[in-house]
Image (cartoon, rainbow, N blue to C red):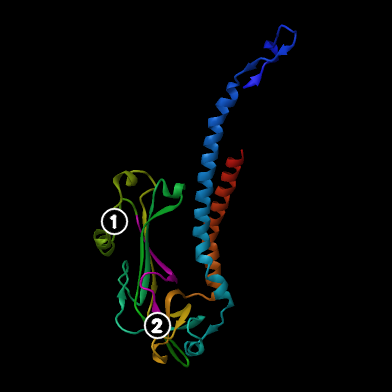
Amino acid sequence: MRRDPLHDRHDRNGRIVPAIVRDDSLELGRPASMYLTLFGALLVGLGLAMAWYGLRPLAVLPRLLRAEVRHPDAAREAADGEFVAVRGTARAAGETLSAPFTGTDCLGFEFEVTERQPFAVGLPWLDARLDDGVATRSFVLEGPGGDLAVRPSSRRFALDTASTVVRVGATETPPDRIRRFVDTREGLDPVAGWVAAIPLFGARRYIERRIDPDGTYLVAGRVDRGEGRDGLALAGDLVITDRSIRGFVLSRLRRAAFPLLVGILFVAIGLWGIAA
């Protein structure tokens, strides 16, 4: 409501009685402002989620940068639960695994399946992740003065090694091993017809990272002494990489940069929308 001076009137005593009229412009502006606030809150939520996604893999970096790289036998002096970084040659301690896409014998692997989709994370130039997973066996890390058992978590560990990528176009027939993998993997279906019909979309990447026997790796994690000295091992959620500490840190920072920048941008736009 607002006053309209053009329609003011006088009462019996000659005093001015202000005319009050309804201001429709305020009523029309209120829903738009409400929708802008809701949209801003949504962007802030998405931005915080993306920022968390980018920051979470960086949590281990401060501990890793403070750690001194040791030979496997030197880790025996570490206290139970102490975070250490050890470099050595990986050797099988028992049966090996068969990598999902190449069939290579290995001590552990991590895989991803991505597909170029029109609406991947809202950005058409990014691939949507369809499936991922890890598998590992216990192995031994050998050094000049002895060895150290390594027991990665069977469900979660960070494997940062060279990737083997098999690319399959939307209309191409995948190799037999990948076709069998898709057929047996629950929730992973062949490329949808409507996606394959769109030019430039539907192509898939089958990405595989491995711990190869006789390869040199840096393994970082907490010492678990288990039952006596013979039970000493690196165990749990481990970082396993074929890079130096510096190379691993730079790799993590590069991967985190994009989601962090997008998250900050979303939060900034969302806060502007809420304040507008």
The x and y percentages for residue 272 are 60, 42
- Residue at screen point 52% across, 40% down: 38
**Picture quadrant of residue 156:** bottom left
The x and y percentages for residue 18 are 69, 15
For the view shown, which residue lies furthest in the bottom direction?
Answer: 145
Element carrying mark 2 = loop
For the view shown, which residue lies furthest in the top direction?
Answer: 12
Q: Amino acid at mark 2?
A: Asp
Q: Is residue 186 above or below residue 197?
A: below
Q: Main secondary structure of the magenta part?
A: strand
Cα separation, mark 1 vs mark 2, equals 35 Å
- In depth, the one of 112 and 29 nearer the eye is 29
> Label 2: how many residues lie within 10 Å, few (<14), some (14-19) or many (20+)?
some
> Label 1: how many residues lie within 10 Å, few (<14), some (14-19) or many (20+)?
few
**Picture quadrant of residue 96:** bottom left
The answer to which of marks 1 and 2 sits earlier in the sequence is 1
Residue that mark 1 sits on = 187
The x and y percentages for residue 108 are 36, 74
**Picture quadrant of residue 110:** bottom left
Of the 4 image quadrants, the one containing the N terminus is top right
Q: Is residue 78 left or right of residue 214?
A: right
Question: Which residues are the magenta region?
Answer: 150-168
What mark, if any, has residue 203 been given in the picture? none
Tell me if I can see residue 124 in this picture.
no
The x and y percentages for residue 20 are 64, 17
Tell me if I can see residue 213 in this picture.
yes
Residue that mark 2 sits on = 214
Q: Is residue 215 left or right of residue 101?
A: right
Element carrying mark 1 = loop
- Residue at screen point 33% across, 51% down: 170
Camera-near label (1 vs 2) is: 1
Q: Amino acid at mark 1?
A: Gly
